[in-house]
């Protein structure tokens, strides 16, 4: 099919999208015997309109999906919808449209935008997490995990968002406010369901060592979040009382310097330990702390405050009494809720002791060479060192002392070496409508303590009821599902008596824990997915998404993969081999794109004006995928001009498409072939190393070289040019697939290029046959010359001596000797 003069991107793109569809070119399974590649982008929440961040996310996946298909892999590249969640529910409250209706509309428009970008998804595998056929398996997982004790009901202090009217995760609280709606977050004591994710803390931590292809910043965030610390548990007896205060410390080597002990204000021993004289002050302080959010009062910058309880604890090593305080910086739910304070060797304890006039006792000295500050008058010495004033441990180094002291405590039954984790169990109860119902009933008869009775597996799914949006969603107080009698009232699966359903729904992060496995067999009814397909396609080879998911989704779904392995569903511990986190697309002003700044660029308007290939090429060219970049209209124009140049070149040489030449190729024809083959080599390597911008830059360079070849006269030249254009179309396929297919068709390609093989380059054509030599005179650089790679000293010398600058430098001087370093330099040593 002949190409038109004009590059009409919209018409070309519509035509090829239709053709790809008809031929089902993106369907997985075309090469059942080939090795697989599973390329995945984080499934989006279907908001109304796509933004540029989405385009970047999907383009990275699309480049790899197309590239691997051409490399001969059986590629799985699916897409679906993270359809549950608060935005749909909040929009429903605002507009009175049911969340399911709004979500379906949004999915339709989002999908249309994806298709207009030419993204290569196998849509036969599309899923939506709000589909009962999907979320029934969330419920199934819940039941399996409940059976094994990996899910439990607990009363706990939760983060209650006063805006969203639901519990939110610790990870969603930023400076005491809700990350999503910025409303204040309060502590509330509530029953909730939790996943026992901490049973896998150690495994999740160790697993990070097996993920060399994850960005270091993500794995280090997960390491910090899990927060393993090796330390010692120790018990302090209380003077004149039977209670014992358990503490955890990583620095038991400083225990001889402990001058007070601090409890959390809500530590369970506080009422018992408080002396009558201190009771008023303690109660006032406890009340004050209860009114503050935990994140606020323990913030690094928060002023440290506390109050004395009147009690004294006994140091387990010396038996000496130290005062017991309560303070804002200790939390009941972290560690044991109590700490031993060593102001001479801990910065926070130091500040607190200064403020309240508590004593300091130096028990660790810096190693020799560092001036000791035996008085600890200006700051705490917090490093390891040599123990002083520490009884039998005096003179030992910190590390061996820690081991010896922990063992001594264990012998006396006063403690033990131990490991703690900062990571907490994952509370996932949400008091909202638009989520997966938790499959539990409470029987008035046989479950008076409301522990919860699991819904039998055969009765799944527990479906979300139809509701009157306004009546159910807009009222405050009880969770929405409590206001739907047809849902609430049911029969007890045990005794058949009247029972009530759990009215909470699951955190939507449950939905995204295992969705990647559902794509393998999206309509499978025998389980969450077909294990045979899992064996073929898991783990995911490349996963693309935003770095903001580092400690929630990316940690939760790593845990879930282990759960699935324990349940015998998968054979891998880790869900994803290579993680790519894409950078942000900022507005032209360098600020985050936002309605507030009026700097939002809509992908749809870009596609409208220039076409999808320009949008894709621009985004790929704007910078390395993992870095942020600022939007630039000029660069969009630049990308468009570049594609037009490719187009015009291909149009100009259409006549050469049928020319053949058996070789050999020389002169101009050889140069054309060399330019094209070098380009293939470079682009291949650039895609492999995630450097899309340099790949495009190389194609631009090659196009310039082909333009420079100008009028072609011989068959060899024409055949070389046709080959070059075919090769360029192939390597442009991941970036500008519509343009590439249109050109290739005009040059005789029988089918879309994504079905063709990725081009190989001829190694003989990519070897540089010239080499640069530095020419020096008395060690000073005078010139650089290009000679044949095979040139020997004599050839290099005569070429160097022919250079004008070198000639000048040598003129009238006596040559003493010549230093020759093969492939690098030649140096003339002259007298005077
Ligand atoms: Zn909120
Ligand atoms: Zn019952």
Image (spheres, grey):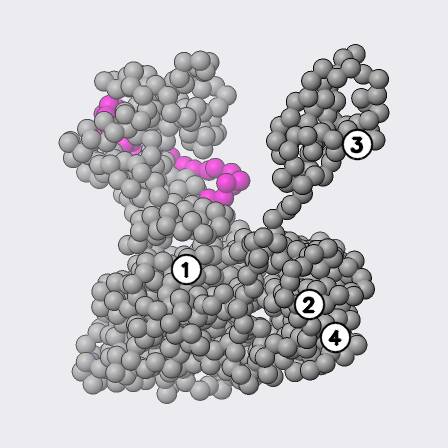
On the rendered image, what quadrant is the C terminus found in?
Answer: top right
The residue to which callout 1 is attached is 576
Q: Element at badge 4?
A: helix
Q: Residue at x 15, y 31 (%)?
A: 412
Mark 3 Cα-neighbour bin, 10 Å: few <14, some 14–19, many ≥20 = few
Q: Residues within 10 Å of mark 1 (few under 14, many from 20)?
A: many
Residue that carries the numbered disc 2 in the rendered image: 719
Q: Quadrant of residue 229?
A: top left
Residue 802: image tag: 3
Q: Residues within 10 Å of mark 2 (few under 14, many from 20)?
A: many
Q: Is mark 3 in CB contact (under 8 Å) with mark 4?
A: no
Badge 4 vs badge 1, beta-carbon distance below 8 Å: no
Camera-side residue of 542 and 27: 27
Q: Which numbered tag is attached to residue 793?
A: none
> Is residue 300 depicted above or below 476 in this figure?
above
Q: Residue 283, how many percent across, how many down?
A: 39, 45
Q: Which residue is mark 4?
A: 655
Give the distance between the C-alpha atoms of the residues marked 3 and 2, in whole angstroms: 37 Å
Q: Is residue 190 visible?
A: no
């Amino acid at each position: 099919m002949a190409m038109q003069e004009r590059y009409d991107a919209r018409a070309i793109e519509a035509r090829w999208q239709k053709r790809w569809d008809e031929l089902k070119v993106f369907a997985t399974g075309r090469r059942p015997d080939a090795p697989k590649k599973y390329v995945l982008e984080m499934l989006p929440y279907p908001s109304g309109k796509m933004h540029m961040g989405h385009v970047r996310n999907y383009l990275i996946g699309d480049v790899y999906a197309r590239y691997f298909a051409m490399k001969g892999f059986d590629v799985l590249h699916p897409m679906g919808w993270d359809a549950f969640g608060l935005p749909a529910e909040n929009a429903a409250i605002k507009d009175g449209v049911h969340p399911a209706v709004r979500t379906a509309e949004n999915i339709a428009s989002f999908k249309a935008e994806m298709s207009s970008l030419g993204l290569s998804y196998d849509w036969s595998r599309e899923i939506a997490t709000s589909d009962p056929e999907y979320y029934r398996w969330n419920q199934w997982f819940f039941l399996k995990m409940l059976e094994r004790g990996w899910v439990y009901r607990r009363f706990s202090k939760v983060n209650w968002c006063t805006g969203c009217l639901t519990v939110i995760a610790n990870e969603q609280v930023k400076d005491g406010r809700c990350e999503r709606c910025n409303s204040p977050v309060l502590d509330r004591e509530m029953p909730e369901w939790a996943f026992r994710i901490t049973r896998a803390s150690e495994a999740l931590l160790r697993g990070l060592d097996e993920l060399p292809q994850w960005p270091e910043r993500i794995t280090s965030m997960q390491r910090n979040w899990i927060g393993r610390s090796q330390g010692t548990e120790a018990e302090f007896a209380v003077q004149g009382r039977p209670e014992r205060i358990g503490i955890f410390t990583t620095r038991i080597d400083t225990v001889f310097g402990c001058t007070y002990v601090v409890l959390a204000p809500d530590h369970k021993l506080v009422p018992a330990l408080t002396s009558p004289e201190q009771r008023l002050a303690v109660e006032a302080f406890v009340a004050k702390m209860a009114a503050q959010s935990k994140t606020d009062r323990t913030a690094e910058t928060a002023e440290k405050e506390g109050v004395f309880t009147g009690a004294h604890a006994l140091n387990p090593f010396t038996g000496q009494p130290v005062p017991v305080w309560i303070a804002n910086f200790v939390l009941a739910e972290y560690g044991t809720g109590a700490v031993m304070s060593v102001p001479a060797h801990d910065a926070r304890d130091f500040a607190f002791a200064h403020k309240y006039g508590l004593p300091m006792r130096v028990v660790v000295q810096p190693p020799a060479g560092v001036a000791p500050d035996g008085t600890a008058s200006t700051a705490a010495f917090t490093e390891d060192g040599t123990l002083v004033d520490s009884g039998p441990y005096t003179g030992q180094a910190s590390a061996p002392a820690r081991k010896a002291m922990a063992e001594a405590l264990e012998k006396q039954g006063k403690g033990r070496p131990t490991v703690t984790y900062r990571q907490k169990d994952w509370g996932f109860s949400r008091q909202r409508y638009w989520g997966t119902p938790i499959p539990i009933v409470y029987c008035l008869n046989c479950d008076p303590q409301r522990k919860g009775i699991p819904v039998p597996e055969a009765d799944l799914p527990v479906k979300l009821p139809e509701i009157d949006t306004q009546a159910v969603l807009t009222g405050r107080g009880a969770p929405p599902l409590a206001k739907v009698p047809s849902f609430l009232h049911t029969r007890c699966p045990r005794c058949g008596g009247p029972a009530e359903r759990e009215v909470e729904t699951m955190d939507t992060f449950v939905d995204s824990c295992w969705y990647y496995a559902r794509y393998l067999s999206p309509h499978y009814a025998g389980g969450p997915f077909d294990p045979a397909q899992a064996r073929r396609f898991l783990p995911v080879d490349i996963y693309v998404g935003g770095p903001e998911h580092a400690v929630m989704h990316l940690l939760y779904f790593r845990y879930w993969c282990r759960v699935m392995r324990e349940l015998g569903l998968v054979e891998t511990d880790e869900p994803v081999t290579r993680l790519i986190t894409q950078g942000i697309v900022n507005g032209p002003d360098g600020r985050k794109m936002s309605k507030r700044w009026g700097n939002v660029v809509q992908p749809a308007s870009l596609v409208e004006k220039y076409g999808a290939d320009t949008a894709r090429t621009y985004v790929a060219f704007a910078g390395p995928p993992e870095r942020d970049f600022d939007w630039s209209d000029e660069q969009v124009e630049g990308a468009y001009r570049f594609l037009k140049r490719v187009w015009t070149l291909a149009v100009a040489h259409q006549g050469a498409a049928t020319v053949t030449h058996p070789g050999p190729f020389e002169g101009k024809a050889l140069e054309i072939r060399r330019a094209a083959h070098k380009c293939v080599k470079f682009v291949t390597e650039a895609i492999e190393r995630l450097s899309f911008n340099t790949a495009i830059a190389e194609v631009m360079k090659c196009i310039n070289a082909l333009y420079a070849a100008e009028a072609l006269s011989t068959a060899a030249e024409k055949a070389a040019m046709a080959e070059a254009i075919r090769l360029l179309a192939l390597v442009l396929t991941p970036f500008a697939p519509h343009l590439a297919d249109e050109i290739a068709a005009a040059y005789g390609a029988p089918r879309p290029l994504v079905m063709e093989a990725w081009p190989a380059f001829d190694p003989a054509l990519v070897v540089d046959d010239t080499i640069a030599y530095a020419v020096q005179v008395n060690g000073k650089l005078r010139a650089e010359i290009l000679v044949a790679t095979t040139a020997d000293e004599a050839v290099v010398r005569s070429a160097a001596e022919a250079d004008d600058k070198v000639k000048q430098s040598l003129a009238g001087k006596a040559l003493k000797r010549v230093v020759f370093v093969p492939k690098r330099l030649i140096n003339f040593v002259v007298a005077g």
